[in-house]
Image (cartoon, rainbow, N blue to C red):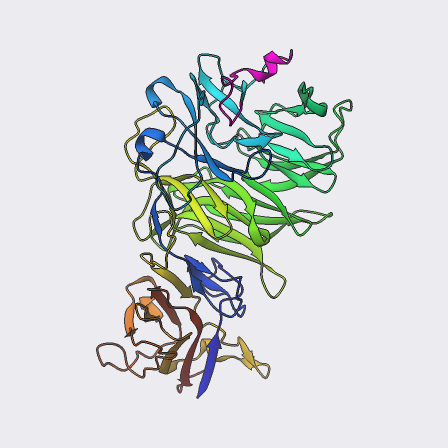
Amino acid sequence: MRTLHVDFTEGMTSDIQDETAGVAKLIKHFDPITKPRTLTPYFSQTDADGSSTTNRIRDFLYYAGSDGTTPKLWGKGGADASSNRTVIYYKSDYTSNTWAATANNSIGNAAQDGVFVEYHDFFYGICSGGTTGKGYVFRYDPTGSASMDNNYFNTLGATAIIGPTTNLNGSIPNGVVHSKDDILYLACGNFIVSLNYNGGSPVATNPALTLPAKYYISAMCEYGNYLAIGCTPYGAGKSVVYLWDRNSSLTTLSESIDFGYGQLKVLDQIEGVLIGVSLRQDALSTLPPRLVFREYAGSIAQIFREIIGSSATQVQLEHGQKFNANRLYFSAGLTIDGVLHNGVWAVARGPSGRWVVWIDRLPNNDTAVYNVAGFYYLGDYATIAYADTAVHQGSSTTGFHMSMTNSSSSYSATSIVETVINPSMPAKIRGAAGHRVYNKQLHTVDVQSLPLPSAGQLVTKYKTDTDVTGSWTTVTTDTTDNAVSRESVVDASGNYFTDGREFQFRIESTGGAIVNALAYKYEELETNL
């Protein structure tokens, strides 16, 4: 007999036969990084805006005032979808679901989703339509002392951003204030414009950079002295990342990096490495879509993970932001094994030094949503705007919501981890075929945890052979206070485990149960191998 211990330090993989120790088929609503040998569930999400269908807030920033004494979470929304207005809100009590507004907080045109940035005590965004037209920059004073300027570049004597004629709602990246020159860079279509504070006498440059017209700029971030600019083709083809030294007097760029086929939507640097996430969908909608993860550290952009979906329905990739603890978060929807997982995903470097991918937060706990419209993290406090129907700016407000991390230890969401086939089982033993290919009798299954809290519950399930695409069989359901182990030699119905060649396991945590490891014992059975 042989006993194997399984951890989940290598994140998610799409290959159910992946033999890498520590990988899982699914990790959802757990933190697998902060304490690498444990899976810690997050608090549940609760209502963050009692007027969400009216306010329609979807873009966020944190701003503490020019003196740093009045920290607030600010949000940009549209109070009246039919008239395409842009409205700015705030709240200083993060546990409240009521948003307030200063004076002069709206303009009569729509702000492009995703663009909301603070620069020298003013807020900026890009208008996507309405009375002044697409592609204009607006500026707002959060003190409310002046009317919102809905064409700020024109105020400075520069022309408006020349936006594309196609609809790029949700595709224009957020602005970047580069730490090397303290200049704000905004993008629309294939153009970049800049705004230099210049000691209080702002200067706008339009355009500061023009890129090939076959691309639209979908992501931007700092990369050392450069501005890294992620570009996606309008049609099928490869995405590219340009490295620009921010010298608008030159027409050449420092570097052009091939980021492969697919729509590059998320780009940021972690620990000096550029991380990009692309959505690849083939021409035939019946073929599985995939999220493709690449890293670039000065040579070529290499794929380090692909998460393949089982359906093209509601597949989406948007909104990438880097926050605390060197983690890159982004919103995505992907169907895996017939289940749509729509939420905030994450990438970070794991304890082995390899990049780890997992589904970090669920917007509405165990209730599925249509899409994530925007999100923001303050430490571990996540604010997520989402829709449970097909809602977009300028359309019906029905189904638009916002959630926030509960301020108390509440666990309404089910945190889930699913293993690969035969997790941690060696492919070979002493040069011969390993136990993976043998017929086996499963004898014992045990999920280990920190002492179970009073409301905690851990459910353990398994599948074998032809059942891997079917329903799970429950092994144990443990609610015993302070329990740290739940060994079982039979399933929940008292039946001995089914023998087979392939075993897969699933752990469901509610009530704050923290998972340490999975252990299972099996015996090789006589076969012709």
Q: Is residue 113 above or below residue 301?
A: above
Question: Going by the image, does 462 lie left or right of 212?
Answer: left
The answer to which image quadrant residue 487 occupies is bottom left
Q: Is residue 327 above or below residue 60?
A: below
- The quarter in which the N terminus is drawn is bottom left
Report whether residue 214 is seen: no
Question: Going by the image, does 524 lie left or right of 140?
Answer: left
Q: Position of residue 369 (x, y in %)?
A: 33, 44
Q: Position of residue 261 (x, y in %)?
A: 57, 40
The answer to which image quadrant residue 399 occupies is top left
Q: Is residue 266 above or below residue 120?
A: below
Question: Going by the image, does 172 lie left or right of 521?
Answer: right
Q: Position of residue 377 (x, y in %)?
A: 49, 46
**Region of the chain picked out in magenta, as a range:** 140-159
The total of numbered circles placed on residues is 0
Seen at 51% across and 61% down, the residue is 11
Seen at 37% across and 31% down, the residue is 56
Between 25 and 285, the one nearer to me in the picture: 25
Between 115 and 148, the one nearer to me in the picture: 148
Seen at 35% across and 30% down, the residue is 55
The rendered magenta stretch, by its main secondary structure, is classed as: loop
Q: Residue furthest left?
A: 493
Between 444 and 86, the one nearer to me in the picture: 86
Between 8 and 87, the one nearer to me in the picture: 87
Q: Judge whether residue 142 is colored magenta.
A: yes
Question: Going by the image, does 239 lie left or right of 114?
Answer: right
Q: Judge whether residue 6 is colored magenta.
A: no
Report whether residue 124 is seen: yes
Q: Position of residue 259 (x, y in %)?
A: 62, 42
